[in-house]
Image (tube, grey):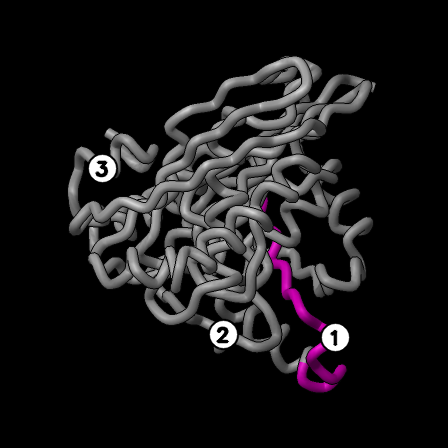
Amino acid sequence: MAYKSGFVSIVGNPNVGKSTLSNLLVGERLSIITSKAQTTRHKILGIVNKDDYQIVFSDTPGVLQPNYKLQESMLKFSKSALVDADLILFITDTVETPGKNEDFIKDVSKSNVPLLLVINKVDLSTQEQLEKLIETWKTLLPDAEIYPISAQHKFNIENLYNRILELIPESPPYFEKDALTDKPMRFFVSEIIREKILLYYQKEIPYSVEVEVDEFKEGQHRTDINAIIHVVRDSQKGIIIGHQGKALKKLGTAARKDLETFLGKKIFLRLFVKVSKDWRDKDNFLKNFGYDQK
């Protein structure tokens, strides 16, 4: 059997389960997952290496109409994934309205690569509702193969994976055989901290925050990490820190525990909060945080 290798782009609207599915397909927890929209901000590659194939899965931000430059960059990540792909997984679910973000669906339909339409959260639907939904999507994306799944309950994931493997082209590998992702360790450290902010803080706070790893020193038995939590306003800084620093301490403790599991060693984590006004609309901040695509 000839060696196969290809890029599989996972795209769709916010909160349909793209990151949950991506982590399942890769077999590793690379993308953070919360119930909040816009959890994923970057395009994150997860690489599956086997003896006779390599699949490069690309988890992308949810498609939305941009309100500031950060979201413009997130949309560019999603659109670029359509260009780079050997296969596209367009993820929807049984909850959202079919046809949402019509312009992006048109972009997907224009792609010249195989397209799998994945309908997630079938456990929240009846058979009759699902059949009606499938018929609707057949009119919207007539060239797509449709796969109903439940990422949370791992329903029909194996069949989807096998079809992906059938569709990726014969090709040499694009990455080294021991590669798991294209992102550096600092990226995952910042994402784990940001995940905890998404979980512990409400309203606009998680969407106003970016985490920057300022120092990452690996020792034999312990890794020392300094991270800066950037917020937009002084009032947000106060909320992140909390009364007598209790909220920040709780955040740091939860992040440290996850980081110790992720890195497999003891972690000394120090968190700092900094007001970086309008960082979501400033090119220098966006470039520094990895959102620049020029």
The verdict on residue 110 being magenta is no
Q: Which is more N-terminal, label 1 or label 2? A: 2
Residue segment shown in magenta: 114-129
How far across and down, in percent of the image, does residue 27 sit? 74, 39
The verdict on residue 128 being magenta is yes
Q: Which is more N-terminal, label 3 or label 2? A: 2
Residue 78 lies, with reference to residue 241, above or below; the image says above
Task: Tell me the number on the disc at residue 123.
Answer: 1
Residue shown at the point (59%, 41%) measured from the top left: 256
* Cα distance between the residues tagged 2 and 3: 35 Å
> Regarding mark 2 in the picture, which secondary structure is present there?
loop
Q: Residues within 10 Å of mark 2 (few under 14, many from 20)?
A: some
Verify CB contact (< 8 Å) between mark 2 and mark 3: no
How far across and down, in percent of the image, does residue 221 sit? 68, 19
- Residue labelled with disc 2: 98
Direction from residue 147 to residue 84 in the image, left or right:
left
- Residue labelled with disc 3: 285
- In this rendering, does residue 98 appear at all? yes
